[in-house]
Amino acid sequence: MPAITEFIKHHYRHFNAAALVDAAQGYVDHLAKGGKMFVTLAGAMSTAELGLSLAEMIRQDKVHGICCTGANLEEDVFNLVAHDFYERVPRYRDLTPADEQKLLDRHMNRVTDTCIPEMEAMRRIEKVVLDEWMKADQAGERYFPHQFMYKILLSDALKGSYQIDPKNSWLLAAAEKNLPMFVPGWEDATLGNMYAGHCISGDVKKVHTVRTGIEYMMELAEWYTSLTEKNSLGFFQIGGGIAGDFPICVVPMLHQDLQREHVPLWGYFCQISDSTTSYGSYSGAVPNEKITWGKLGVDTPSFIVESDATIVAPLIFAYVLGW
């Protein structure tokens, strides 16, 4: 048995540790039966460098579609081209407001213990993607946010700027496979804000040059319907929020709003969350609640690992990969 998998199986026997093993084995079993897996990324998993394991999951066909926040979409590319300029703040809890202001004055935007350099990361990508936005705008073409990123990564525009091994970029791995991707709420991301600014300034004339979240749902409905004609699709949710809530709703939408029959429910469900179960919280809702919304069935293999996704997700991926 591979080293990491052996360690997990031997030591992770109870509580959240056992839930991790059950979820990982459920993932493996789902794929072994011919199922496919859909992964959702909330939080700042790209800045946490999840690409170190997720990229290989994509290359080895352990992931068949992704829904992520705009932050995760762009931050993987920020890390790809500006990793050497990132700064880690190990004792970030001790920072005073004045310390935070000093980081801002240096154009260092903090994500927990990691500072993203504005000029080397955000502004560098803005320049390259703006060229693509304007080119599409002038040609009367429209693309989704991830399609613009795929275009950039598959061109030579950034190759000379890589500061990590490109095999550790999950978005590059996704682009190379043209992996189905959905990015709801992209507007709240850094590049979404920049896009709004360029629409206001007139650099981009047509606001809908970047396609919208409703169009993403329409694409997801078509993709889900087509894929599940032959394969069960599982749902592996990292965190909560829009990255998880948006795509899981495609099933009740197909059933209840379009009145389609014979649409299969999600075939596996796992959520990694450190959100406390509470009144009205989506992120903290236990999987059984999703049965009442027509998302999961009584017999759907369902798991929740109540822990930090930056710890849990790489371990589950290592287990699935047989590391």
Image (cartoon, rainbow, N blue to C red):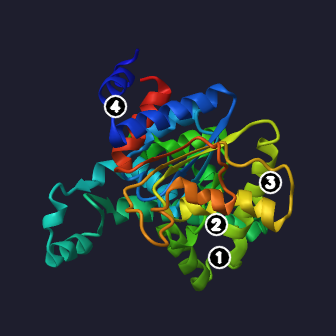
Task: Describe residue 311's horizontal placement relative to residue 256 as left or right.
Answer: left
Task: Describe residue 209's horizontal placement relative to residue 269 as left or right.
Answer: right
**Which residue is found at the position 54% from the left and 34% from the top?**
26
> Splitting the image into 4 quarters, where does residue 8 fall?
top left
- Residue 2: mark: none
Q: Earlier in the sequence, mark 3 or mark 2?
A: 2
Residue that extends furthest to the front in the rendered view of this protein: 298
- Residue 13: mark: 4
Element carrying mark 3: helix
Q: Amino acid at mark 2?
A: Trp
> Splitting the image into 4 quarters, where does residue 245 fall?
bottom right
Q: Nearer the viewer, residue 180 or 273?
A: 273
Q: Is residue 71 above or below residue 302?
A: below
* Label 3 CA crowd tier, 10 Å (few <14, some 14–19, many 20+): few
Q: Is residue 122 above or below residue 80?
A: below
* Label 2 CA crowd tier, 10 Å (few <14, some 14–19, many 20+): many
Q: Amino acid at mark 3?
A: Glu
The residue indicated by pointer 3 is 222
Query: Of circles 4 and 2, which is in front?
Result: 4
Query: Of circles 3 and 1, which is in front?
Result: 3
Examine the rendering and report whether any part of residue 59 can be seen.
yes
Q: Alpha carbon of mark 3 to alpha carbon of mark 1: how far? A: 29 Å
Q: Earlier in the sequence, mark 4 or mark 1?
A: 4
The residue indicated by pointer 2 is 133
User: Residue 304: image x %, image y %?
Assistant: 46, 48
